[in-house]
Amino acid sequence: MQDERDDMSGTSQGDDSARAGGRIEPVNLAVDHRKSEDEQVDDLVAELTALGMNPDREALRSVVRKRSS
């Protein structure tokens, strides 16, 4: 079965907001190597929460670790 995910947004092409004409933009998350891992995770959680998302803290911690190495 073919994957219907849009490469830029990670959402399926049949997403309700896309059908409603809403534009979905990718979120660019920068890792600040001057901050501790916990501070970086807190910043990312705050950014994503402000965008109306419910981020998974442990998943973000994994991303921070990978980007820092």
Image: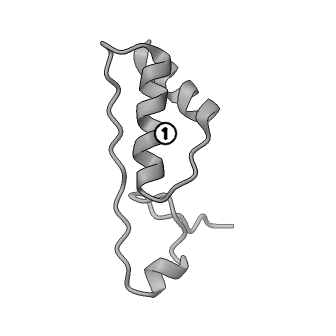
Residue 63 horizontal side relative to residue 47, left or right: right
Horizontal side of 20 relative to 60 (left or right) equals left
x, y percentage for residue 30? 32, 33
Q: Quadrant of the N terminus?
A: bottom right
Tell me which amino acid carries mark 1. Answer: Val
Asked if residue 42 is positioned above or below residue 3 in the image, the reply reads above
Q: Where is residue 69 drawn, in percent x and y?
A: 44, 12
Residue 15: image quadrant is: bottom right
Q: Nearer the viewer, residue 18 or 43?
A: 43
Left or right: 34 with respect to 63? left
- Image coordinates of residue 27 in percent, x first then y, are 36, 50
Residue 28 position within the rendered picture, expressed as x and y whole percent measured from the top left: 32, 44
Badge 1 is on which residue? Answer: 45
Front-most of 44 and 62? 44
Quick one: 69 or 48, which is closer to the camera? Answer: 48
Name which residue lies at 57% across and 26% down: 62
Which color scheme does this rendered protein use?
one colour
Residue occupying image coordinates x 53% and y 64%: 5
